[in-house]
């Protein structure tokens, strides 16, 4: 496809039961411009590839790519490198695209990232929660994150493909919650971020997803990866930050991540010594865990408790599950 406005990238891994509904949420609507759908089979052991190939035969706008497993981030990277659209939108296979007339693209022309609203629904379609961003046009990414609450997901945003390629903005492979790490770098480099309170996606809250799984092994993997992300972002800050605003930007994000990380470690029973070690590491690296004002009220309460003697031991008795 030579002329394409939007590339919609859909990674696939054990999602054959969701693919038809996901694709229908795109193809049954009429977008007012040429678009493509790139379905990336990430070494899925189920029949996702076969289902995708059937769907591709029914619609010439669908391309199917197959690769060895690289995780969600690696599948998205493959989509980025094969995309030809001016803009890129990521859609998880178990989610739904809520299509609008996309008239906001005209007003957002020149933006490198466009953030939109989203809502969480249960598998039956019932409303769970929503994220409503402010309406802002062409603000620097660092300033935007410092001024407004940001949903770190990559799926409620539209990215200028040239911006991603020019700044080597790709996802880390085999890393859970990779969106936090990716968007921290993306917003740092973005000179023009726009935000519009219009729902673009519905996120289906499936109970067996990795990030929502009650499986202790999965939760410990998530905890471990979040520790890695905090370390990566501190290293990226130290290498790239230049001036007060840059440090405020990184410190706000890592503080928020770190406070959530410590809370998670307590809840899933990570060794107290390991939690204390992570807390001390963040403080030593200049992360203002205790002085940061958080958008989440619960985190502001948690940070005050965390400063008390033996707080982690006490919190484990109350929160461990």
Image (cartoon, helix red, strand yellow):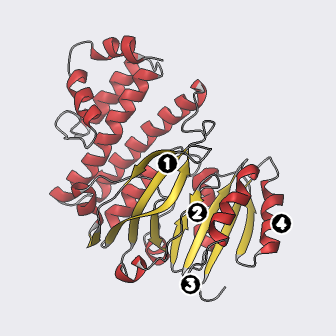
Q: In the depicted view, which residue is nearer to us: 72 or 200?
A: 200
- Which is more toward the observer, 97 or 262? 97
Q: Earlier in the sequence, mark 4 or mark 2?
A: 4
> Which residue matches tag 4?
54
Q: Is residue 307 above or below residue 140?
A: above
Can residue 195 be seen here? The reply is yes
Looking at the image, which residue is at 53% across and 55% down? 202
Q: CA distance from mark 3 to mark 2?
A: 24 Å
Whole-percent x and y of residue 268?
48, 22
Task: Please tell me which residue is depicted at 63% across the width and 68% down the height of the picture.
Answer: 26
Q: Is residue 190 visible?
A: no
- Which of these two is toward me, 281 or 107? 107
> Which residue carries the number 1 mark?
120
Q: Of the residues under marks 3 and 2, which one precedes in the sequence?
A: 3
Q: Which residue is mark 3?
A: 33
As displayed, is residue 252 above or below residue 194?
Answer: above
Mark on residue 221? none
Residue 243 lies left or right of residue 262; in this view the side is: left
Element marked by disc 4:
helix
Residue 299 percent coordinates (x, y):
28, 33
Sort mark 3 into few (<14), some (14-19) or many (20+) by Cα contacts within 10 Å: few
Residue 188 position in % (x across, y down)? 32, 62
Does residue 266 appear to the left or right of 254 in the view shown?
A: right
Marks 4 and 3, how far apart in space?
A: 24 Å
Nearest to viewer (mark 1 / mark 4) = 1
* Residue receiving disc 2: 77
Q: Is residue 40 above or below residue 230?
A: below
């Amino acid at each position: 496809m030579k002329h394409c406005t939007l590339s919609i990238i859909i990674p696939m891994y054990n999602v054959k039961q969701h693919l038809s509904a996901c694709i229908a949420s795109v193809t049954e609507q009429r977008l007012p411009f040429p678009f493509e759908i790139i379905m990336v089979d990430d070494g899925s052991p189920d029949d996702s590839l076969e289902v995708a190939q059937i769907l591709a035969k029914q619609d010439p706008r669908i391309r199917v790519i197959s690769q060895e497993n690289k995780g969600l981030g690696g599948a998205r990277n493959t989509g980025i490198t094969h995309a030809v659209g001016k803009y890129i939108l990521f859609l998880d296979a178990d989610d739904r695209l809520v299509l609008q007339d996309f008239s906001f693209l005209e007003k957002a022309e020149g933006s490198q990232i466009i953030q939109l609203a989203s809502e969480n629904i249960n598998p039956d379609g019932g409303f769970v929660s929503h994220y409503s961003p402010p309406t802002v046009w062409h603000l620097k990414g660092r300033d935007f994150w410092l001024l407004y609450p940001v949903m770190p997901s990559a799926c409620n945003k539209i990215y200028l493909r040239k911006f991603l390629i020019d700044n080597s903005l790709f996802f880390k492979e085999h890393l859970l919650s990779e969106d936090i790490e990716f968007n921290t770098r993306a917003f740092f480099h973005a000179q023009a971020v726009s935000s519009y309170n219009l729902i673009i996606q519905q996120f289906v809250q499936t109970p067996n997803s990795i990030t929502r799984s009650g499986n202790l092994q999965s939760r410990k993997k998530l905890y471990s990866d979040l520790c890695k992300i905090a370390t990566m972002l501190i290293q990226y800050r130290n290498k790239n930050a230049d001036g007060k605003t840059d440090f405020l930007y990184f410190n706000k994000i890592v503080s928020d991540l770190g406070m959530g990380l410590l809370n998670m470690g307590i809840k899933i029973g990570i060794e107290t010594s390991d939690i204390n070690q992570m807390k001390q590491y963040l403080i030593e690296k200049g992360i203002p865990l205790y002085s940061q004002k958080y958008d989440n009220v619960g985190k502001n309460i948690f940070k005050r408790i965390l400063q008390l003697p033996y707080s982690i031991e006490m919190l484990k008795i109350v929160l461990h599950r």
